[in-house]
């Protein structure tokens, strides 16, 4: 399986990471997002993964790949950073929001 795109974001203040993978293979396309959270002792205490593929609601690897390639994940200075507590119940909620999912 050839991975066409991968990116990992580190949320250092939340002790979490988010990784995304896009596979655009026409026979087996996927968009995968995984979040890993650590507890106060740096032990993994939560792993959430969303895997989407052909037949899933609004699935389109070509569109996802095109949008992601336009993103700028260069250095973001404090004045440019999103402050999750003000804008979202959690970073997890914001990430799930891109999939159109509802938090349970």
Image: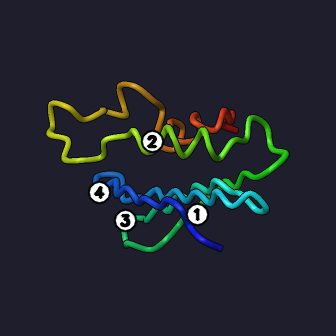
Numbered disc in front, either 3 or 4:
4
Direction from residue 52 to residue 67 in the image, left or right: left
Q: Quadrant of the C terminus?
A: top right
Q: Which secondary structure lies at badge 1?
A: strand
Q: How many numbered circles are shown? A: 4
Front residue of 64 and 7: 64
Residue 93 sits in quarter: top right
Numbered disc in front, either 3 or 2:
2
> Residue 96, image x and y in percent?
59, 40
> Residue 63, image x and y in percent?
60, 38
- Mark-to-mark CA distance, 1 and 2: 14 Å
- Mark-to-mark CA distance, 4 and 1: 16 Å
Direction from residue 32 to residue 84 in the image, left or right: left
> Closer to the N terminus: mark 3 or mark 4?
4
Residue where numbered disc 2 is placed: 91
Numbered disc in front, either 1 or 3:
1
- Mark-to-mark CA distance, 3 and 4: 12 Å
Q: Which secondary structure lies at badge 4?
A: helix
CB within 8 Å, label 4 to label 1: no
> Closer to the N terminus: mark 3 or mark 2?
3
Q: Which secondary structure lies at badge 3?
A: loop
Residue drawn at point x = 42 percent, y = 59 percent: 7
Residue where numbered disc 1 is placed: 47
> Closer to the N terminus: mark 4 or mark 2?
4
Relative to 97, does residue 40 appear above or below in the rendering?
Answer: below
Residue where numbered disc 3 is placed: 40
Direction from residue 33 to residue 71 in the image, left or right: left
- Mark-to-mark CA distance, 4 and 2: 12 Å
Q: Residues within 10 Å of mark 3 (few under 14, many from 20)?
A: few
- Mark-to-mark CA distance, 3 and 2: 17 Å
């Amino acid at each position: 399986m050839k991975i066409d795109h991968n990116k990992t974001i580190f949320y250092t203040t939340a002790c979490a990471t988010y990784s995304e993978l896009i596979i655009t293979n026409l026979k087996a396309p996927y968009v995968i997002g995984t979040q890993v959270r650590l507890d106060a002792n740096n032990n993994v205490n939560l792993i959430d993964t969303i895997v989407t593929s052909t037949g899933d609601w609004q699935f389109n690897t070509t569109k996802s790949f095109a949008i992601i390639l336009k993103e700028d994940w260069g250095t973001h200075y404090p004045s440019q950073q999103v402050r999750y507590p003000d804008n979202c119940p959690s970073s997890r909620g914001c990430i799930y929001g891109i999939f159109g999912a509802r938090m349970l």
